[in-house]
Image (cartoon, helix red, strand yellow):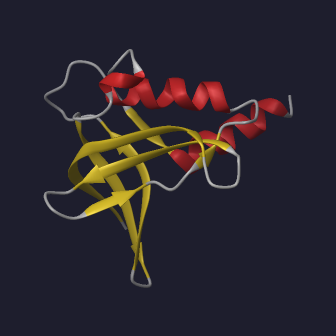
Amino acid sequence: MTQKILARISRADLGFEDHGIFAVNLGFDYGGAVQGTGFYALSNASGGPFLEALLNAVGVSQWKDLEGKTVFVLKQSEHGQHLIEGIEKLPTEKRGGRIVFKEFFEIQEALAKL
């Protein structure tokens, strides 16, 4: 079951990770406990659209504005692991939306096959 947990974006990493792969990682602070999305590779056709989708979901127009924003983190808890599935704007925010990472990449993959 997916849970919505209130969190503040504490980090918005964009660059080359340890293996030289251009990637993005968002870090979330749940009020003491922290968790990251893990790095998503951007060196493919989905990279630009993924960054755009992240900015749109949070409701900001610049990367530098991600840190400090409060969102709902969509988490799946299974076998003792708590995986971040996506993010969603707060209902009080006028801008923003929702992104579920797996669904986003599945749609991008299907579009690439057209």
- Which picture quadrant has residue 106? top right
Please say if 86 is above or below 2: above
x and y, in percent, of residue 72 in the image: 26, 46
Identify the residue shown where x is 13% and y is 57%: 31
Q: Residue at x 18, y 25 (%)?
A: 93
Residue ID at (61%, 49%) = 17
* Residue 20 in picture, x, y percent from top left: 71, 47
User: Hey, which residue is sitting farthest bottom in the picture?
Assistant: 79
- Please state if 42 lies on the left or on the right of 34 as rendered: right
- To which quarter of the image does residue 8 belong? top left
Question: Residue reaching furthest top?
Answer: 61
Q: Is residue 104 left or right of residue 75?
A: right
| The N terminus: image quadrant | bottom left
Residue 34 image offset from top left, x and y in percent: 27, 60
Q: Is residue 11 above or below residue 59?
A: below
- In the image: residue 95, left or right of residue 92: right
In the figure, residue 95 lies in which quadrant? top left
Q: Is residue 5 above or below residue 55?
A: below
User: 82 left or right of 102?
Assistant: left
Q: Residue at x 61, y 25 (%)?
A: 49
What is the tally of numbered marks visible in this picture?
Answer: 0
Residue 96 horizontal/vertical position (percent): 32, 25
Foreground: 29 or 15? 15
Quadrant of the drawing holding the C terminus: top right
Residue reaching furthest right?
Answer: 113
